[in-house]
Image (cartoon, rainbow, N blue to C red):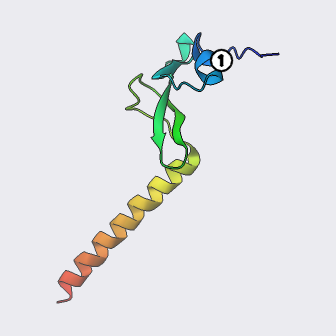
Amino acid sequence: MQRHNPTLSLGAEEHIRHKRPPQRLHFPAGLGLNWVVRPDVELGAVLQIARDSEGEQLLFTSEEVEVQARQAAERRVAELEAELRKRSR
């Protein structure tokens, strides 16, 4: 027995059942969100939520936000350390 998922747009379940990744899947009209297929090194392709249908305004998970913040902080620390090395010469 197949179950219907009302949160997926028409046609989305067909893509999932047959493992044919679609270019886009849409949330119900009022939400203004879209599913987009993104490449993934480990999995090949993954679905991610975006504010736009092109996938340029992605919504990130809390874990992804933490990783991005940590990477930005590490880059800033490296910049400051390089500046301190220049000044101490």
Q: Nearer the viewer, residue 88 or 15?
A: 15
- Left or right side of 76 for 5: right
Q: Is residue 22 above or below residue 64?
A: above
Q: Quadrant of the N terminus?
A: top right
Residue at x 73% of width, y 14% of height: 4
Residue assigned mark 1? 7
Residue 45: x, y in percent?
A: 51, 37
Q: Nearer the viewer, residue 55 or 45?
A: 45
Q: Which of the 4 image quarters holds residue 7?
A: top right
Residue 83: tell me if it is visible. Answer: yes
Q: Is residue 67 above or below residue 4?
A: below
- Left or right side of 83 for 43: right
Residue 71: x, y in percent?
A: 42, 60
Q: Which of the 4 image quarters holds residue 74?
A: bottom left
Residue at x 50% of width, y 49% of height: 65
Crowd tier of the residue under label 1, counting other residues whose Cα lies within 10 Å: few below 14, some 14–19, many 20 or above:
few
**Residue sitting farthest toward the right:** 1
What SS does tag 1 mark? loop
Residue type at mark 1: give it.
Thr
Q: Nearer the viewer, residue 37 or 7?
A: 37
Q: Quadrant of the C terminus?
A: bottom left
Residue 46: x, y in percent?
A: 54, 37
**Residue sitting farthest toward the bottom:** 89
Report how many numbered discs are placed on residues in the image.
1
Residue at x 52% of width, y 20% of height: 25
Q: Is residue 31 above or below residue 72?
A: above
Residue 88: x, y in percent?
A: 21, 88
